[in-house]
Amino acid sequence: MVQITAIPSIAQMLGVNRIVQGRAVTNPVGDPTLTKEQEKELRLKYILKALELLQTDVEGPTVVTLEGD
């Protein structure tokens, strides 16, 4: 399982091993200041990052961001 969240510490406390750092509590995978197309691209990046992390072996809680691991 991969969780995308703006508050990774809570996900870690719940025992989630694969965590993608989201943007904000109100919009974890979006940004209301972007155009519709830009937001669609941003959301796709989050999904692809989550799928990449899902295929990665991890030992213990691992938090990644869109910019890098």
Image: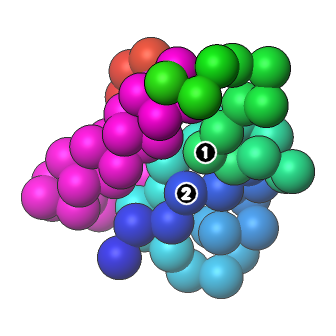
Which amino acid, by three-letter code, is at mark 1?
Answer: Val
Q: Residue furthest bottom?
A: 14
- Helix, strand or loop under label 1: loop
Q: Residue furthest right?
A: 26
* For residue 20, side relative to residue 45 (left or right): right
Quadrant the N terminus occupies: bottom left
Is-magenta flag for residue 27?
no
Vertical placement of 1 versus 50: above or below? below
Q: Is residue 42 visible?
A: no
Percent across and percent down for residue 20 are: 50, 48
**Residue range (magenta):** 38-66
- Helix, strand or loop under label 2: strand
Vertical placement of 57 versus 24: above or below? below
Distance CA(mark 2)–CA(mark 1): 8 Å
Which amino acid, by three-letter code, is at mark 2?
Answer: Ile
Percent across and percent down for residue 56 are: 15, 54
